[in-house]
Image (spheres, helix red, strand yellow):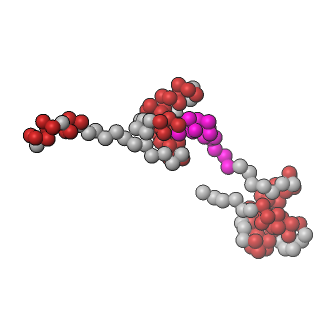
Amino acid sequence: MPFSYPVELRDKAVKAYLKGKGTQEEIASIFGIGLSSLRRYLRQYEESGDLAPKPHPGRPPMLGEVELQRIKGWVEVTPDIELKELCALVEQEFGKAASEPTMCRACQALDLRRKKKSYYASEQDREDVKKNA
């Protein structure tokens, strides 16, 4: 994923060009940025006077902090809860239809490790079964 250059670097490059320290190509080379980036910073500076990077586009997360904390509470109370059950609880409580992959990512973000039930036959502990084994 591409990264944003720091505002300080952008500011220095724009001010160097505006002070006439060199051509756009020279300034871009000096500061180690692309020519099109410098041109974009100059245009942005002329339009708004601000050089802060624009926010990355994308959909906001479906589950907010409130929902995540409720999920954390549910998993702590019932560690063997299934993703389907968590999805149903989220839909019931918040009215949001969450998919199983979304719920899995939420659990990973919360660093939750769900514990599955071990299917252990309790009959193995009976004395009459131990004698026959």
Q: In this orientation, which residue lies closer to the viewer: 38 or 12?
A: 12
Q: Is residue 49 left or right of residue 69?
A: right
Residue at 45%, 46% in the rendered image: 113
The quarter of the picture where residue 80 lies is top left
Front residue (pair 119, 106): 119
User: Horizontal and vertical percent for residue 31?
Assistant: 76, 71
Please tell me which residue is depicted at 71% across the width and 49% down the height of the picture.
Answer: 55
Q: Residue furthest left?
A: 132
Instruction: Tell me residue 7's x, y (percent).
Output: 78, 61
- Locate the N terminus by quadrant: bottom right
Horizontal arrangement in the rendering, residue 132 relative to residue 67 (left or right): left
**Residue at (66% x, 59% y) in the render:** 3
Using residue 112 as the reference point, say whether residue 42 is left or right of it.
right
Magenta span contains residue 70: yes
Q: Residue at horizontal 82%, vertical 67%?
A: 12
- Residue 75, image x and y in percent? 48, 38
Q: Quadrant of residue 120?
A: top left
Q: Is residue 18 above or below residue 108?
A: below
Q: Nearer the viewer, residue 25 or 63?
A: 63
Residue 106 lies in magenta, yes or no? Answer: no
Of 73 and 23, the residue lying toward us = 73
Q: Position of residue 124 (x, y in %)?
A: 19, 39
Q: Would you say residue 32 is visible in this rendering?
A: yes
Q: Is residue 9 left or right of residue 111?
A: right
Q: Taking the image as drawn, is residue 97 in sight?
A: no
User: What is the span of residues highlighted in magenta in the rendered image?
Assistant: 56-72
Quadrant location, the C terminus: top left
